[in-house]
Image (cartoon, rainbow, N blue to C red):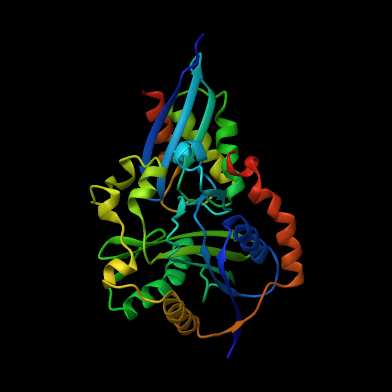
Amino acid sequence: MEEWRFIDFGLVDIRDMMAMDEAILKSDEGNTFFFWTPKKSIILGFFQKAEVELNLSQCKDYTITRRISGGGIAFSDERCRQVNYGVVGTIDNALFPMDIIGSYKQICGVLIDTLIHYKLNAAFRPINDVVVDNKKISGNAQTRWEGKLLQNGTLLLDFDIEEMLRISNIPKEKFMDKKIASVREGLTWLDRELGEQRDMEEIKNVMKKKFEERFSIRLKSGSLSGKEIKLTETLLPKYYSDEWVYR
Amino acid sequence: MEIKTSQGIHKSKGGLIRSFVATENGRIKEINISGDFFLFPEEAFFKIAGELKGIKAKREDIEHKIEEIYIRENIQSPGTSPADFTESIMKALEV
């Protein structure tokens, strides 16, 4: 059976993580699946302006950076109960479709299979969300580079909605076409759905297994290559710079 | 002459598009776009605001220009079309 690389980065500074993320995409170490848990932070989508999307005066104790993929802000509170994942794969029209929505659906399938394992009514909501009973539980963002794709996403285990509303400027238009009146009705998280806190390592193991099943491969624990570490070091200043974050 | 920047918000199927536009003598003088949409290749996005500067602040002109950039740069933006960007910009112009 084919083996793909697996890495668990643990609790990370998102600026370091976004540099490693880009380095994995732009190196050539084969298909990779990885996890990380962000410290208290905000990651802006590629097309978002910080001063438009965020209430910056309320964000002073957050680490803020930007990622190379589009989509909305990824907000992580100090509860640190989120499983974030990354997938780097070669677009082959079988496992990773060329069609953008098709490829989101394929990778989001891992999250859906995981949630179904916990007996939840999970589904894909195009373009890039996974929902439980039509409430968003996972946001995902993809970019592509030289025949490969990078998808990042989060599975919310716990989430401080009030805090997210305090730091962001979300206009009412955001929710109007989703048949929900407000952000509070539109989001959920695993602890709430299950009525108990599951161990994060247990959830990650379920996700890993569902990933292996969906792609018919085996995940083998590994680490960044020398080339990736070198590229990460080159990319780090960007993710720490105001020019990138506040452009 | 005073230049006023207005905001327009439009929700496409692919995300929220917020446009900030200033005009002078009926033409776009400054334009910034922020949003949670997806667009590939990402770098081509900067050409949209860059090339809209100086053109007539009219729906047909704006949409035509964006469509031209989409074709030239081979842009794909699932759930968001040139018409959606145009709508967001028009909402700013109509403020």
Question: Is A203 on the left-hand or right-hand side of A30?
Answer: left
Q: Position of residue A209 (x, y in %)?
A: 46, 83
For the view shown, which residue lies furthest in the bottom direction? A1
Q: Identify the residue at horizontal 45%, vertical 71% (top origin).
A: A106
Asked if residue A24 lies left or right of residue A53, the reply is right
B60 relative to B30 in the view: left or right: left
Q: Quadrant of the C terminus of chain A?
A: top right
* Closer to the camera in the image, A75 or B61: A75
Q: Is residue A106 above or below residue A67?
A: below
Depth order, front residue of A88/A162: A162
For this orientation, the residue located farthest to the top is B1
Say which quarter of the image contains residue B17: top left
Residue A131, relative to residue A67: is it above or below? below
Across and down, in percent, residue A166 comes to: 37, 43
Q: Nearer the viewer, residue B15 or A201?
A: A201
In the rendered image, the quadrant that contains the N terminus of chain A is: bottom right
- In terms of image quadrants, where is residue A241? top right
Residue A59 position, x and y percent, is 48, 43
Residue A10 visible in this rendered orientation of the protein: yes
**Above-or-below relation of B74 to B57:** below
Residue at figure coordinates x 55%, y 50% from the top left: A63
Q: In this rendering, is residue A16 above or below A32? A: above
Quarter of image, res A198 = bottom left
Residue A171: x percent and y percent?
34, 39
Q: Residue at x 56, y 49 (%)?
A: A66
Q: Is residue A121 visible?
A: no
In this rendering, the count of numbered labels is 0
